[in-house]
Structure formats: C-alpha cells, structure tokens
Amino acid sequence: MPDAKPVRTAPALVIRDLCKVYETEAGQVHALRGVDLRIGPGETLVLLGPSGSGKSTLLNILGGLDSPSSGSARFHDFELNGATAAALTLYRRRSVGFVFQFFNLVPSLTARENVALITEIADDPLSPEEALARVGLADRMDHFPAQLSGGQQQRVAVARAIAKRPELLLCDEPTGSLDSESGVQVLEAIAEVARDVGATTLIVSHNAGIAAMADRVIRFRDGRITDVAANAGKIAPREMSW
Amino acid sequence: MRPAPLDRKLGRDLWRMKWQALAIALLIACGVSVAVMSFSAQAALAEAQRAFYAQTRFADAFAQAKRAPRSVVRDLAGVDGVVAVDARAAESGLMDVPGLARPALARLISLPDDPAACLNCIRLVQGRLPDPQRLDEAVALSTFMQAARVRLGDRLTATIGGRSVSFRIVGAVLSPEFVYVPAPESFMPDDAHQGVLWAPRAAVERAAGMNGAFSAVAFRLASGASTSTVLADIDRILAPYGGRAAYARKDQPSHAFLTAELKELSTSASVLPPIFLIVAAALVHLVVTRLVEAEREQIGLLKAFGYRDRDVALIYVRLAGAIGLLGALGGGLVGGALGAAIVDLYREYFRFPVLSVQFSWPAFAVAVVVSVLAAMAGSLSAVARAVALSPAVAMQPPRPAAYRVGVLDRLLKGPAVDQGTRMIVRSLERFPARALFTALGLACGLSLLVGAQFLFDSLERVVDQTYYRTQRWSDSLGFAEPRHIAAVREVARRPGVFAAEPTRVVAARLKAGGRMETTRILGLDEAASLHRPLDGKGAPVPFEGRGLVLSEALATRLALRPGMPVWVEVLDGRGPSAELPITGLARDYSGFAAYISRRELNRLMGEGDLASGAELLVAPDARPAFYRAIEATPQIVGASSRDDTVANWRQVMAKSFRTTIAFYVGFAGAVAFGVAYNMCRITLSERSRDLATLRVLGFGQATCAYILVGELAILALLAIPPGALGGYALAHGLVAAYSRDEVRLPAVIGAQSYGAAIAAYLVAVALAAILVARRIWGFDLVTVLKTRE
C-alpha cells in the first residue's frame, strides 16, 4: 500500500489504517480498506477516483458525519473514531467547513442569512458580508437561492463554509452540478478563501482536470489509496482546463 | 397474476406513508363511527320500541279523570275516530319500601278485565300474574323492583287515598307506558322511588274507593283520525268527572323521552361526522399535494414512458380513496362496537323485554361511499397539478422554492432574530393556504374538545339554577287533594322541618293568538323564599296582582311578552277561565312553568286559602324521622328530595354523559393529533434536507427540532382563539341538538372547561410534534447530502 508522503510541519490530520465496512443485506461492503494519510495544515488535497472507491467515505469520516469501523483518524488532538455524537457536532461546528455537490442552501434564507446561519454559532467568524464579498457576491447578499444561478449558489455555500474560518474545509464534488465556467469560479473562490483563512482543504472530485490546483493528489480505488502525487506545478483554477 | 406496476407503487406509497395515512384514516374513522354508532343504536331502540308497542298494544291517546263511572266507557268508545278503549282504576300514594329512606311513589293500576283486548298491556318477565280472586296480590314494574331491591313474595304497604293497603308482589312486569320512568318534575330516572303496581280491578277499586269507576283511560285511534278533535271530544265527555286534559301518544312522558332520544341520535349522526370528514379531506389535500411535489420526477418519467394523464391521476385518487376506505372500515368496526356499548347503556334506562344490538348496514354503506368520495375530493387539486405537469419540466430538477421577505419578516428585522426563526416565519408566509388549512384543522380539534365539555357545564348550570337558586327547598310534598293552609302548618311541625311554604298547583291550558299549551300553573306565596322564579340575571321576579310569570320557553312557544294578556283555562276544580296579564318572564331550564301568586290562584279558583303541597327545608339528620312521619300521613301522596334528585342527576351524568364525552374527547384529540402530525410530517418531508444540512454544519438536534415544530407551535397557538370560539359556537349548536321539552340546556362553558380543553389540545399537538421531531435524531446525514432536492 502506498504510504502518504510525510509533510514537514506537525500534521493537522493523521489517518492510520482506517477501515469502513457497511453491513448490507447483500453482505459486507468494504468502503475503506486500511487508509493511511498525514495531511499538513493549510495543505490542499484533491481526492480522485471512480464512484465507490472510498473517497467520499473518507471525507464523511473526516467531517464527523460517519464513523470508521476500525483504525484512527485524528484531527490535531481530537480522535474522531469513538467520539460521541455531541462531540462530533461540536467538532463540525468549530473546525469544519463543508461545500456540497448540491449546494445545500436553505431556500427560505437569503444569501446573507445562509451565511449568518454559521456566523451565529461560530466563535470568531467573518461577517456574512465579508464572507460573501470574498466569493464575489457582495451585490447578491439579499437574494434568495431561487434568485441565484447554480454557480452563485455554490459560491454562497463556499462563503458559508469559510465564514467560520475553518481549520478543515471539505468539498465533496463542489463542481459536480455546475458548468465549467461556474465551476472555475467556485474553485477559485475555494482556493482563495482557503488560502486566506489558512484552511486545510480536501476536494473530492471525479474530475482529474482539477488536480492541478492541489498540493497533493490522492487517487483511490476499491477503498484503498493507490497513488499519492505531490504537485510540483500547482496552478490557479482559472488557468486550468477540463 | 402479479399486480400492475402502478398498483404496486400505490401499495408501497401507502406503506411508506402509513402513519400519515393512518392519522387521516383515524379522523375518517371517528366520523364514520359516530354515524354508525348513532344509527345502529337508533335502529336497535326503534326496533325494540316497535316490537314492544306492537306486542303490548300501546295506546294512541290517554286521559285521566278523578272518578268516572264505567258506563262512560261506552260514550268514549263512540267518539268518532276511537277504535278501542281501555279504562282502568288507578290511584297514587306513598309507599314504604324497606331499605329506602324516603317513601316511594306508588301508582296502583287495575289489571285489564280482558287481557286479550287490553291497551298498554303489561308483559310478565318474572313470577306470575295475581290470582283474580285474591285482593292482596300485585305485580310490580320490574325496574322499580330491581332498583328498590323488592323480591317476589315481598309485601309492600302503600297509603292510597288515605287508606293503608298491602300487596304481596307475585310478579315483575314491563309496561310500554313505563319504558323510561322519569321522576316527577325531573327528567332523570329515579327507579327506586317510582313504584308502579298492577292488581286485579276489585283490589284497586277497593283501595281507591272507586267501585264501578275508572280514573285512567287509554285509546286506540283509527288511522287518519284527527287527534286534536278526538282529544277535545274526550275532554268534553270526561269533564264532568274531573277529567284532566287528554293527551296524545307524543306527549306521553315515557314515549316523549324515547322519541327525544331517537332524535338526538339522528342529530349526533348528522352534526359531528361532517366535521371529521371535512378536516380529513383538508389533510388529504395537504398530504397529496406534498406527495405530488416530491414525486414530480417520477410523474415526468411515467409520462415520458407513455402513461396517460388518467393513469397518473388515478395513482393519487386511488391513494386518497384507499385512505378513505381504510378510515371507513375502521370506523364501521368501532362504530359497531360503540353502538353495542350504547345499547348496553340504554338497557339501564329503557326497559324493553328485548333490546338487541343492531348494526346499521345502510348507515355504514353510505358512510363508506361518503368517506371515500370526501378523501378523493381532497386529493383533486393536487391531482390536477400532477396531470398538468409536462414530462420535460417534471424531470428537470425543481428550482429552489421561491421565498421572499414577507410582512411578518420585516417585523423580525434585527440581530435578535435567529435564522431558524426566520425559516419558520418565511415558511408560514410562503405557504399561507397550508398554514390556514392547518390552523383551521387544529381549531376544529380544539372546538370539538371545548364543545365536548359543554354538556358538563351546561348540566351543572341547570342543576344549580333549578335546585339551588330557583328552588331552594330540600323536600317537597304533594297532597292528594288541595287542603287548607293549616295542613302546611301541620307539616311544619314534623321533625326536622325548619321552614315550610305552601304551593298550589293546577293544570291549565294557556291560549294566545291561536297558540295553545297545556301546562301547570304554580301558585307561590308572594313572600316565598324557598321557591321563586328568577329572571335572566338571577333576580327574583315579583308577582304583580293577577299577573302570570311565564318561563321564557313557554312565552316563546306562545309568542307572548310581558304586558300581553293570555287566556287561561284551568283544568282542575271547577275549571274556571280568565284572561290574565303576563307580568314577567322567568329563566328556567326544564318544563314549561307558569307562576302566579297563590292567593290570586285561589281567588281565580274561587276557593279558600288552599295548598296542594308544601316545600320544606328539612334538617338532613332529621330526615328518617321526617319521612316516617309523612308516610303515616294519609293525605300526602308525593314526596321528593332535592338531594336525591341531584344525586340521581350526578349518577346518570357519571354513567352516560361521561361515556359520551369520553368518546368526544378522544375523537377531538384525534383531530388535533391527526392535523398536527400530518402538518409536521409534511414540514419534515420538505425540510429534511435543510435540517440535515444544518446538522452537518454543526447545529444540534434540539435546534433542528425547534425549526421543525416551530411552525406547528405558532399555528397551534394561533388556532386557540378561533378554536375556543368555534367550541362556543358548537356548544350553541349542541344546545339545539340536546335540548328537549324536559330540559333546555344553556350554552355555558366554564373557564375550567376551556382550560381543560386547551390543555388536552396542547397535549395532542405536542405528542404529534414529538413523534415527528424524534426522527431528527435518526437522520442519515451522509445520504441527504448526496441527494438532490
């Protein structure tokens, strides 16, 4: 099994022999089969692989949405395996920002209010206005999701994710529902604001084209990491093509 | 054969939404069960009545006289329209029944001379008929025997017409005249004190001093005969013999009560079920609308595959129909069982030889059809929406629901309002029709709960007004004949009597403007304190000269107001007539009373200072001695006690009204629960993705539960004022349904009842909210993020 390449500073995330087995009527499904990975603070990783390869499962476990069957996933001093539901809720609230494929905005709240959802419960957040300005939506703050394009909706989601200045930014197929133009805008927003707040960023994608924006590219197959490649020539999303 | 795919879809959809479907079906079941219960009980009662009346040849008309020679029977039989006459000797008195503190009323009636030709024949249920040769044997009303614990072979001694007579009870009987036996001046049964004995004619004639005479007569009339003409002829013939106004079967006390009960069942069956069905249809509308919204892609897909609009429409119409059918079947089962329970209850009050449980198949069939149609009707607007969806549009992901900043929202500006509260308020403003439907449904539930409490409060008011405010005596006595006032002073000297006031009662016909009512006029002393008519505000209405004070209900019937004259024909004594002014109206809740100064009444009668009874205040601990004393007084033929009457009321209320009200409270709770549960499930279905997102973003379950049930909580609180008002309106409606000649119920609902109803309502709503909100704890956060809205 290829091991993760050691990073120079103290890692933000340490993953050891992480396994996830789902019990189904058809039998056991091994979603993760012993994943080892160390991720440095502020590092941007793109996780690539076909459907069912385990990348989203890993993201869910690291986001505190799912629990591993065995192994360890440690965020700084916080061990996710075995943590209580309340502890995981607090972990998500304090440390994790999420961007989802289908935006997951609350339709009855404006862009500003969707972001305010987070700023109301975070310890030292950006203001909703600042967060939205950073994703280029200063002039759309009082629009409801129905009044925004897909790309704009996803940028609101990015603003919502980074408003709390998360240490960990998890993006699951953030461009999956977007055209390429909108996709680039969203990735730019992610890259810029992640850099600004210093978030460790994991982006799950089917799209190998976006690998160029990562520090490292992790490839998954059948629940295992098959390749870890450091990206010597990291480029900005607007220069990418896919 | 495997079911078609759409049938399988229907089955699975129903299974998936089983709790919502059941909550709606529950409401339909409530409505159907009330209808089936009422009509089944009615069928049982009507059949028992029909059979018993036919077997015992229950009379069409009745009359009483003081003492009419038997030769008059021939004259009566000759009245045009009369086909059969049965004249009996009958007399009343007091009877000492071992084990009873207060003497029981004894009505002694002669057995028919020819059992084959009798009217109002009795039916032996135990023992045997008296030996015609023996003068000391009698049969007694079975209800009285049971309540007073009189056994076959017991000897009862009564004081009849001043003479002490003793009978050995050899049989228990039922009589069509005494199917329901209300106590005098009340409408509640008091079986233990309502003794009815039948003995051979010779025995009764001897006891009543009525040789060759009769005092009670029953008639069978030809079909098509004019009852009023026949009654007038009978009155004319019996007038010389102290005849009192003849009356038709509809006014016979037992029959009138039974008729009112049958009518009440029809009313219950027609008032309540529509409320349940309307609320259920509104819920079907909400649920199917949401379902169509959630399944728009499937609808598009089906249409793209070539299914016709009709096929798609039928999915949802059949779903609604299935819910209706489920409710109707459940309602039929429960209604049948409740009908049987009511019939069981009736067996305690209505004495028929056979009162068997029935199931009203016609009512059930109609209920099934109406329920299915109501549910289908509820689905129609959602179905129209499904039909109108074009496949291409339907298969595209829907745009996020379009919200805007509404009026309420503007009021909530400011940092104090959190986003969760904003979500709640915007949802209310975004779906105003749904909010309205839900609030109205909840208000209906509360109205039913408040309305159900009304019977208790109303009856309490009747008891309070009748027995503690208008009448303030503890005991009352009736004399066989009007007696000089000295007799009352005599009674006042009996043990334990604190106060005694005379009364004078006469039967009379009151005529005004072509209307006529037969009633009794009660003469009271002007300074009487134990009994005084009260006005609507509770103040005593004074007597003014010859003026009559009428009960409001009687004045309404005769279209009379104070200041107007009324023609009075007294039916007792010499039967004087006079025009008297109406000087006041009294608010009372039972019977049709008319009051006058006793002095003026005696003057009208042309008699001296007479009393026909007395109202007394008796020390509770001296009662046994007092009753022993009056039993020994031959002239006293009636005795009633307020405490016994009120205790009886309470007992009957405990047995029957509590049962009825428990049904209603259960049903009303079901409405509130059903509406709240469905509303909450719909919100959950719409919001589950938002709520799961919030959970992922770090919000706790409690915050999400707040957002989920907040909307319901607001609507539930908003529904309280209209619900309470609706309950008051329902109480007014029920007043009309439950009021009878014997008792008119005031529409009263006490603060305590409002409190109890609102508490029960909030419990039902909270239960529904908790049942739905706990699903938040089981959210699969991963799945919801992977699904498109």
Image (cartoon, helix red, strand yellow):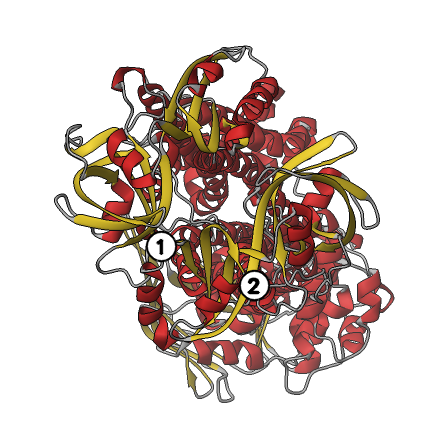
Position of B710 relative to B257 (above/below): below
Q: Quadrant of residue B609?
A: bottom right
CA gap, disc 1 to disc 2?
26 Å
- In the drawing, does residue B371 fall left or right of residue B54? right
Q: Amino acid at mark 1?
A: Pro
Q: Residue at x 26, y 20 (%)?
A: B115
Instruction: Give the number of the disc on residue B124.
Output: none
Residue lying at 61% horizontally and 30% vertically, measured from the top left: B377
Q: Which mark is residue B471?
A: 2
Where does residue B117 sit, x and y in percent of width and height?
A: 31, 15
Above or below for B415 versus B158: below
Q: Viewer-proximal residue, A137 or A90?
A: A90
Q: Earlier in the sequence, mark 1 or mark 2?
A: 2
The amino acid beneath tag 2 is Gln
Q: Chain of mark 1?
A: B
Secondary structure, mark 1, is: loop
Give the secondary structure at mark 2: loop
Residue B12 appears in the picture as rendered = no
Residue lying at 52% horizontally and 26% vertically, measured from the top left: B238
Kindly identify which chain the residue marked by label 2 belongs to. B
- Where is residue B462? Give x, y as percent: 56, 58
Does the rendering let one see residue B61?
yes
Q: Position of residue B224 (x, y in %)?
A: 55, 10
Q: Is residue A182 left or right of residue B728?
A: right
Kindly identify which numbered label has been placed on residue B634.
Answer: 1
Q: Residue furthest right?
A: A139
